[in-house]
Amino acid sequence: MREMPANQLNPRIKNVWRISDAIWIVIAFLCCFAPFAIIAAVEPSETWAGFVALMVAVVFAALFVFFVVVLPPIRYARWRYELTDDYLDIARGIFWRKRFIIPFIRVQNTDTRQGPVLRAFGLSSVTVATAAGEHEIPGLGNEEADLLRDRAAELARLAREDV
Amino acid sequence: MEAPQQTQQPQPAPQPEGAEPVKHHVHHSYMWLESIRTLVVVALAVLVTNFSTIAGVIADGGLDGLPTGLALALVAGGSLLAILVVVGIVVAMRVVSYKHLYFIVGPEEFTLCSGVFSKKRVHVPYQRVQSIDQRATLLQRIFGVCTVLIDTAGGASNKAITVPYVTKQQAEWLRAELYNRKNHLAAVAASVVGTAVTVPGAPSASAAASPAAPAASPAVAPAPGIAAGAAAPSAPAPVGQPAFGNVLDIGSQAWDEVGGLFAGAGVDTGRVTYEYGLTNKELFLTGLSGSTSAGLILLGLIVGLLQLVGNAFELFGDAANSVVASAVSYATSQAMGAVVGLVVVPFIVVLLVLWLLSALGTCVSYGGFKARRRDNRIEVEYGLLKHSFQGLAVDRVQSVSINQTFIRRLLGYCEISLGKIDAAEGENASNNQNANELLNKGLVVHPFVKVSRVPEILAGLIPEFADLPQDSIPVAKVALRRALIRRGIVQGGGFWCAVAAAILAAALAAVGAAAESGVLYLESDDLFLLSMGSVAAMGLFVWAAILFIIDIIGAVLWARESSFAFNRRFMQVSNGGLSRTTISFPRQKIQFGCARSNPLQRRAGTRTLLATTAAGQGGTTTTLVDVPAEDAAAWLDWLKPGGNQACGS
């Protein structure tokens, strides 16, 4: 196919993904693990509970390694975008690779969002909404995000009213 | 109500500063028509709840020593009082809320004010008006009032603005006024910016000239002496059109002439350039091919088939037996047949009656169907009892879609519908469930039309869509193999049905083998169940084979007929198969495009195209699987602003 879009996300996004995924995995792990662990602790005769707890721990350890070590670099490598004068080009996806073309004249509004994790790393995510759904660019440096938002807002204002 | 309106038409030009905007109240039937409905409901409720009391009084011959007559009178009086109190409260509420319900057609925007304690004002800039619909229930029709729904494109959370109980005249005036003001503003904006209006084919002359029309129109319209609505069919504009009509048109014309009690005189809302209805045949076929009817036919066929199969089994059974036994079993089978017939025949009859009724219902709901082009909007109205009127500005049409279900395809017919941005239903519209079924498919401009007539209808209704792309790009060669695998196996109902049948058969065989080797002891009942199970597995296999063949045929047809095309202004996607859909949309309406591929597609060199428009609620994505990769790349380039310049016109 044609050449990929030029820009990559800010490399710090990998750590953002790691931290937010790790938080979710730990919470889910505690929810699944705690009941069996408690049973195993209270009734040592119930060996199956300990076994299940062990299995849960193993599964979640594998998930943890996958989401924290393996996935972020691949995701990062596959996530590309390019901001030209009049359209936004996004290529992403690991197995199902998607290539989006979003003309700015169709963009209705743009948002900049910053969760606590993103803020800690000095990143923002920009959401570009059209009349039929929105697209998020997750990890951009703050000044880059502002640039993108301003560009989109300016072009959206010029857009003809033609939905 | 009508008199002050006709004299106090606000001028479409900006009003003089400081002038109080005219507050238009809705029709006074808002108070009493709704109250009548409440009265009926409450009366029924009270009657039902008091029935036992009344019956008890009559049975006991009096209440606590009171004579029967007096007791009855007491109960009846109490019920009456209860009804009166409830209805009184409702009427009072309606009266008060009526006083606070009005709309203003201002210079910049339309405003609807409502609410007694918590005031609510909804502002609609004219530019944002998507479509204006009118709906009327039977009761409303009799009194010549209707509900006006104004759609705006406000994303997923938007709601249609509902103006309830407006007289027909007021509604038509409102519609014309809103569109004229919208066109006027668009023309002003265009002249300021110096670019063309986005409407491709909109004559800017009409946009500029039309704001003058509504001021004069109420005075002009009654002059021809034509009743409300009848103006349109008798307009001389649709020249050269064959007179399409059906039996139910007479009914709808009668409606138009009677018009309803408070309908008022007709309002000239614009010039009709193209109009058509349904012929008798089309109306009839529409009724017969409704989805409910198709399901009922299928059910009837299955029952009939089962009976046939049952009879066949009886006959085979006879052949296997000896002569004497066969005579006996013949007699019993005759008796059994009679019993089965007794059960099945009424069932089929009931199905037939239901089917005919539903077909009749569909016919009536499509009765008086009319689609027309008036100035730069498309209007569709239908419904013999419950009336529905939909108006859509041409520049708001998102897509034109031509659908052929399997039955339509066999007959060589299709359905034409226009995609539009749908609003979530307005507050009052939740009780119009039936109307919504028709509304959800976009705007159906013809439910059942011969394929050969489609170009003519499109040329008349939306000439803006005239230069659709011709040279279509078929799906890749490899798509056939992939479609066979995808539709036949991965998503194939037949394949998975066969898998289920195989598992069932294997399990039964295992049980049977276990029984034979003496591991498992089975009662005769269990053996019977076992044999029944194997029959069921056989049936499942047959069903799976049928489904599989259908899947395969569908896949082959899909690979042969599917294509996409694009030119300077339009894109067209055809998805074939047993049922077929061709959807065309202007480049301007594509919100964003996406080319997707999974690892297998990358190896085969194909991509899936996804073009998203804003039609429907929250957007519609049109998909075409397995387009050659280079064509997909070319399409993405075309999608970029200015990317269409390379294409010829």
Image (tube, grey):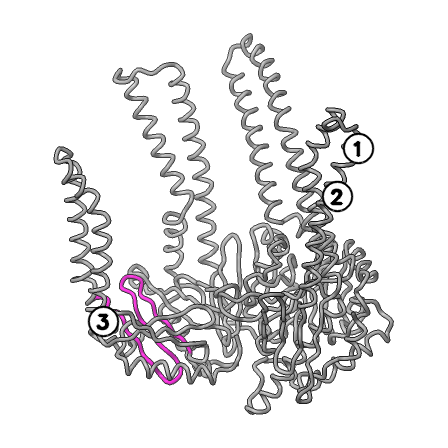
Outermost residue on the front side: it is B65
Q: Nearer the viewer, residue A94 or A161?
A: A161
Magenta stretch contains residue A88: yes
Q: Residue at x 16, y 58 (%)?
A: A65
- Of residues B348 and B21, the one nearer the viewer is B21
Q: Which residue is mark 1?
A: B70
Looking at the image, is mark 1 or mark 3 nearer the viewer? 1
Q: Chain of mark 2?
A: B
Q: Name the residue beneath numbered marker 2.
A: B80
- Please state the horizontal and vertical placement of residue A95, each as a whole percent of the image: 28, 61
Asked if residue B475 is positioned above or below residue B180 in the image, the reply reads above
Tell me if residue B30 comes above or below residue B43 in the rendering.
Answer: below
Circle 3 residue: A13
Quadrant of residue A40 within the rendered picture: top left
Chain identity of mark 3: A
Q: Which residues are magenta?
A: A74-103
Q: CA distance from mark 1 to mark 2?
A: 15 Å
What is the three-letter code of the residue carrying label 2? Leu
Sequence-first disc among 1 and 2: 1
The secondary structure type at the circle numbered 1 is helix
